[in-house]
Image: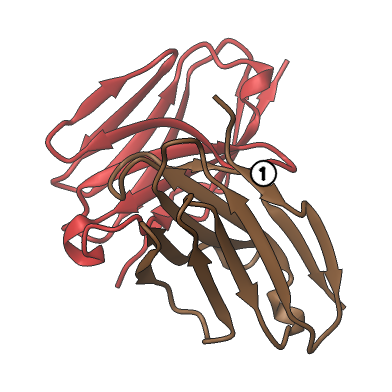
Amino acid sequence: GESVGLHLPTLSVQEGDNSIINCAYSNSASDYFIWYKQESGKGPQFIIDIRSNMDKRQGQRVTVLLNKTVKHLSLQIAATQPGDSAVYFCAENSSASSGNTGKLIFGQGTTLQVKP
Amino acid sequence: KAGVTQTPRYLIKTRGQQVTLSCSPISGHRSVSWYQQTPGQGLQFLFEYFSETQRNKGNFPGRFSGRQFSNSRSEMNVSTLELGDSALYLCASSLRSDNEQFFGPGTRLTVL
């Protein structure tokens, strides 16, 4: 069935270290993936996205890696800062199964804690 | 450019009542999607509207409905509220359905 899951519910890192948040998805037809950051009391904030014709995409301090063979997605945050503390969600959209609509399937989320 | 706005931010209702939530998308965005977020179920897709047409609907009962106006603003309605409807309701807008979605701050609904 449709599901997007995260491997760890909580990740604790030291300020300045790199963080890696993982996500596994089950729908092999998924062709668009997004990472969101959600801080307490706020809506999810777009971080970075990647389409299935790519295996890596970089943004400012963030990198998303996509491995379609094992249906795995990861978000790497370089030089993690206290302001990065939040819940991170991966989301998947399959234009084939959703009829090319905006239906996103979200994972359960990983809480990133940054220790000063 | 202003972000997605949602009103009201907080709402308290009692069982059996109905509620209407409003969402104003980013200017120029024609797709509006609604999600329900709860601690137990996480973020779940409710429905999406594009050019005033519902394009997709999630697995929610018929008590949940929505609409979109010609200016792309959207409303969702929940009738005959149940305790389990207590959640954060999020609206997201995008240029097209297969583009990145930008979320509003949400409406926190509490059903007593």
Q: Is residue A49 left or right of residue A27?
A: right
Q: Is residue B108 above or below residue B85?
A: above
Q: Is residue B67 left or right of residue B36?
A: left
> Would residue A34 be visible to someone looking at this image?
yes
| Of residues A18 and B100, the one drawn nearer to the viewer in this rendering | B100
Subunit of label 1: B
Please report the residue visible at 58 percent of the width from the left and 40 percent of the height from the top: B4
Please report the residue visible at 25 percent of the width from the left and 45 percent of the height from the top: A32
**Image coords of residue B73 (percent x, y):** 54, 53
**Image coords of residue A12 (percent x, y):** 62, 31
**Image coords of residue B39 (percent x, y):** 66, 62
Quarter where residue A106 is shown: bottom left
Q: Is residue A79 above or below residue A38?
A: above
Quarter where residue A52 is shown: top left
The image quadrant where one finds the C terminus of chain A is top right
**Rendered shade, chain A:** red
**Image coords of residue B52 (percent x, y):** 40, 62
> Would residue A112 be visible to someone looking at this image?
no
Q: Which chain is brown?
A: B
Q: Is residue A93 above or below residue A39?
A: below
The image quadrant where one finds the N terminus of chain A is bottom left
Looking at the rendered structure, the secondary structure element under dot 1 is loop
Mark 1 is surrounded, within 10 Å at the Cα level, by few (under 14), some (14 to 19) or many (20 or more) other residues, namely many
Residue pointed to by mark 1: B105
| Of residues A114 and B45, the one drawn nearer to the viewer in this rendering | B45
Q: Is residue B18 left or right of residue A51?
A: right
Q: In the rendered view, how is the structure colored?
A: by chain
Please report the residue visible at 35 percent of the width from the left and 35 percent of the height from the top: A74
Please report the residue visible at 87 percent of the width from the left and 78 percent of the height from the top: B112
